[in-house]
Image (tube, helix red, strand yellow):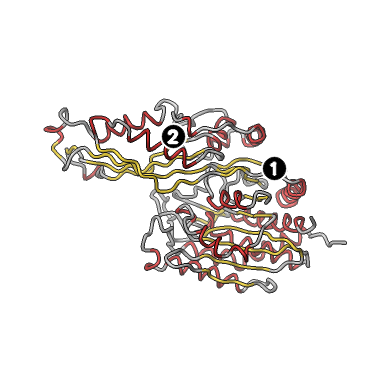
């Protein structure tokens, strides 16, 4: 008879490992400004990525895991990959995934906090990258070590920690192809890079939106001119931008206008959103740091959940060509470059969507303006395959044991390129996609934090699910 895992003992093991070694190492990781290549083109020369991966590798080598093999996989001109193989007692494979690259600093960190200096306060570790998702490799190995500490069988494990996820994972397919024979065919993938609706239970991510990030260039003049002399004769770049944006988006409600960006929401996903909305209620909107007097786009939590998981959206994330207010003279600027970020429904064809966006923006430009849209990353979304009974039951048991509440299922508004890649490659694989990015954790923005107690409980929950997986 297979020995059952003692959840209380697993929790104690996990908590001790977090307190004794994970948190101190995560603090060192936060101090490393290893921005993703999209934001640090000289990443190799600057050496921050190398410092981060060596820090993680050194910690991993010290863990009490039997016969673990670790290497830093390298390919010419590409970011490195932390690759770990752990033999198992079961003839099967589990892939555990995370990433170690980070988003830029961003502005607005409150006094006493900063992106590159860790601060532990009220059970939270503040700093860039701890929650998104530097903790992943530490949680993955600790879950495995917790099983081995009790003599609980587990499948062969492959841990993949990439270094360019925040750039759209352009290097990952090359590493996966190079390591395909050693990765094998997993029956379970554990991804720790997703969101959580609250900090009271285990949350399973059932879908991820796709993402198109591109630059819209608008050019009117060969040089800037006095606004008094030029306005009324030449239109402005901002006026052209407004006209072009109206082709894409309804300015009154934010609805996108292109049919190519919409899909039918599956009934199962709508039902899961209904259940999640009942649990989360007003906290769906409350997780946003609204300025005083500002409200959400709807007062219906279900509508907000569906908007952020299955509806296409457009956000302007940057503009070049407009001077800062303090340095802005009375000048009609000659050109601007606008960064557009589109989120796509999970099953939307990113290639067709990108083509439709480009066609719409570049056709018949106002006043004959020089307009071009260049898409830098067209990433499709992901919709999880149907859950097998064992996974559904094991997640419920793990959530009860580690949190005292039922597991919840919900789509996520972000994008993880690796999930779409694996979903196509291994259509029969089951996915445990979860994470620590809960209310106000603010990944990518100021004051990003890791909820320490939640991370501990999640680590133990992963161990319980992996124990059950080995019995299938």
Q: CA distance from mark 2 to mark 1?
A: 42 Å
Q: Is residue 335 left or right of residue 117?
A: left
Image position of 352 with respect to 174: above or below: above
Image position of 171 with respect to 382: above or below: below
Q: Is residue 99 left or right of residue 337?
A: right
Q: Is residue 426 left or right of residue 354?
A: right
Q: Residue furthest top?
A: 252
Q: Residue at x 42, y 62 (%)?
A: 33
Q: Secondary structure at mark 1?
A: loop
**Of 455 and 472, which appears nearest the observer?**
472
Q: Residue at x 53, y 40 (%)?
A: 287
Q: Which quadrant of the rendered structure holds the N terminus?
A: bottom right
Disc 2 target residue: 292
Mark 2 neighbour density, 10 Å: few (under 14) some (14–19) many (20 or more): few
Q: Residue furthest right?
A: 1
Q: How many marks?
A: 2
The disc placed on residue 183 is none
Q: Which quadrant of the rendered structure holds the C terminus?
A: bottom right
Q: Is residue 363 visible?
A: yes
Residue 470 position, x and y percent, is 76, 59
The disc placed on residue 386 is 1
Res. 67 image quadrant: bottom right
Residue 112 position, x and y percent, is 43, 55
Residue 310 position, x and y percent, is 55, 36
Res. 468 image quadrant: bottom right
Image position of 369 with respect to 182: above or below: above
Front label number (2 vs 1) = 1
Q: Secondary structure at mark 2?
A: loop
Q: Residue at x 21, y 37 (%)?
A: 220
Q: Is residue 127 visible?
A: no
């Amino acid at each position: 008879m297979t020995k059952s895992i003692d959840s209380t003992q697993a929790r104690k093991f996990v908590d001790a490992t977090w307190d004794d070694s994970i948190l101190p190492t995560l603090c060192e990781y936060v101090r490393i400004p290893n921005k993703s290549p999209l934001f640090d083109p000289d990443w190799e020369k600057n050496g921050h990525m190398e410092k981060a991966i060596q820090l993680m590798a050194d910690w991993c080598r010290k863990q009490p895991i039997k016969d673990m093999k670790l290497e830093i996989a390298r390919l010419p001109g590409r970011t490195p990959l932390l690759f770990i193989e752990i033999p198992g007692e079961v003839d099967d494979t589990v892939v555990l995934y995370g990433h170690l690259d980070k988003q830029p600093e961003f502005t607005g960190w409150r006094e006493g906090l900063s992106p590159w200096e860790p601060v532990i306060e009220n059970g939270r570790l503040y700093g860039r990258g701890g929650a998104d998702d530097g903790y992943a490799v530490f949680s993955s190995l600790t879950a495995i070590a917790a099983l081995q500490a009790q003599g609980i069988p587990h499948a062969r494990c492959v841990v993949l920690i990439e270094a360019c996820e925040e750039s759209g994972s352009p290097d990952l397919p090359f590493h996966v192809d190079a390591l395909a024979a050693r990765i094998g065919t997993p029956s379970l993938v554990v991804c720790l890079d997703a969101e959580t609706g609250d900090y009271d239970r285990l949350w399973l991510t059932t879908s991820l939106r796709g993402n198109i990030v591109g630059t819209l260039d608008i050019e009117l003049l060969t040089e800037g001119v006095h606004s008094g002399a030029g306005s009324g004769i030449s239109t402005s770049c901002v006026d052209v931008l407004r006209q072009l944006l109206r082709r894409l988006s309804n300015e009154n409600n934010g609805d996108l206008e292109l049919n190519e960006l919409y899909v039918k929401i599956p009934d199962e996903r709508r039902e899961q959103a209904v259940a999640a909305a009942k649990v989360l209620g007003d906290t769906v909107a409350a997780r946003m740091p609204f300025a005083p007097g500002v409200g959400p786009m709807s007062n219906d939590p279900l509508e907000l959940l569906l908007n952020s998981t299955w509806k296409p959206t457009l956000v302007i994330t940057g503009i070049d060509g407009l001077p800062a207010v303090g340095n802005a003279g009375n000048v009609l600027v000659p050109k601007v470059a606008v960064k557009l970020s589109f989120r796509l429904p999970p099953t939307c064809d990113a290639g067709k969507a990108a083509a439709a966006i480009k066609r719409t923006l570049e056709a018949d430009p106002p006043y004959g303006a020089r307009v071009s849209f260049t898409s830098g990353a067209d990433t499709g979304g992901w919709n999880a395959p149907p859950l097998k009974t064992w996974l559904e039951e094991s997640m419920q048991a793990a959530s009860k044991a580690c949190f005292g509440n039922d597991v919840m299922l919900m789509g996520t508004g972000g994008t993880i390129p690796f999930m779409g890649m694996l979903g196509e490659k291994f259509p029969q694989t089951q996915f445990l996609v979860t994470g620590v990015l809960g209310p106000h954790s603010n990944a990518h923005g100021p004051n990003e934090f890791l909820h320490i107690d939640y991370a501990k409980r999640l680590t133990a929950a992963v161990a319980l699910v992996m124990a059950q997986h080995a019995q299938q």
